[in-house]
Amino acid sequence: MFTTLAKGFVITLGLIMPLGAQNSYVLSQSIKKNHHLTAATVCIVCDFLLMSLGVFGGGALIASNDLAYQIITWAGVIFLSVYGAMFFRDAINAQAVEAAESATPSKRKVVIFTTLAVTLLNPHVYLDTVVIIGSISGQYQGDDKYIFWLGTILASLAWFYALSLGAAKLSPWLAQAHVQRAINLIIAVIMWVIAYSLIKPLLLS
């Protein structure tokens, strides 16, 4: 029982820990202490729904729907490209960092919708949570499948709250102008790399 739980936890942690669109957005909101726990919670809820779909039989349906995949992919490419450009602008413009520090914090509903966008408009999220985790869960039956699924949920919960609370705790250092510009540049590059990785297969097909 514990081995199955631990396997679900470790596998999921390995999939969601790399710095991607979700983690980048939660990190940026945590540094600003702007509804960062809300952003983390939305990520966890999305993971809960998508991993549940994968573990309990929806992986093949998502993977086989080519039209839905292409729509999500193109929407994701556009969103991530524009969002990356915004972070890049802030990275090269010192005044933009200062303006961001003095700007009115985003409203909770804006944070919720943006978190949903960086999560649901990224096909890699479906690959990780629905397809890969769904495929691995296929080796389990009965109660073991539920235990594995519980491990995946606990990993998401632990990671996103740890990232959110940890970044908020370190915000006095992370919010320094030179550190913030470096973080913005890293996030911009990550957004563009993800966007390129999404569009490349479509351009080559």
Image: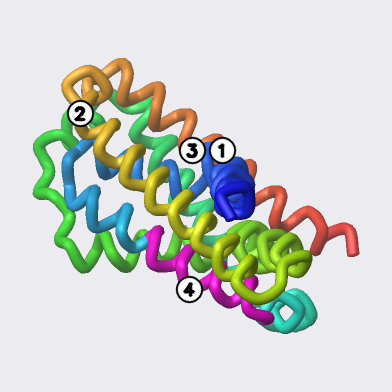
Q: Earlier in the sequence, mark 1 or mark 2?
A: 1
Which tag, 2 or 3, sits closer to the chain's start? 2
Q: Which residues are magenta?
A: 43-57
- Give the residue number, with chain letter if any, for mark 1: 18
State the mark number for residue 169.
2
Height in image: 174 above or below 62?
A: above
* Local secondary structure at mark 2: helix
Q: Residue 170 vs residue 131: left or right?
A: left
Mark before the other along the chain sequence, 3 or 1? 1
Residue 15 visible, this angle: no
In terms of secondary structure, what is the magenta stretch mainly?
helix
Q: From mark 2 to mark 3, how far is it between C-alphas?
A: 23 Å
Q: Nearer the viewer, residue 154 or 66?
A: 154
- Residue 188's disc is 3
Q: Is residue 56 above or below residue 134?
A: below
Tag nearer the camera, 2 or 3: 2
The residue under the point 71% across, 49% down is 197
Disc 1 residue type (three-letter): Pro
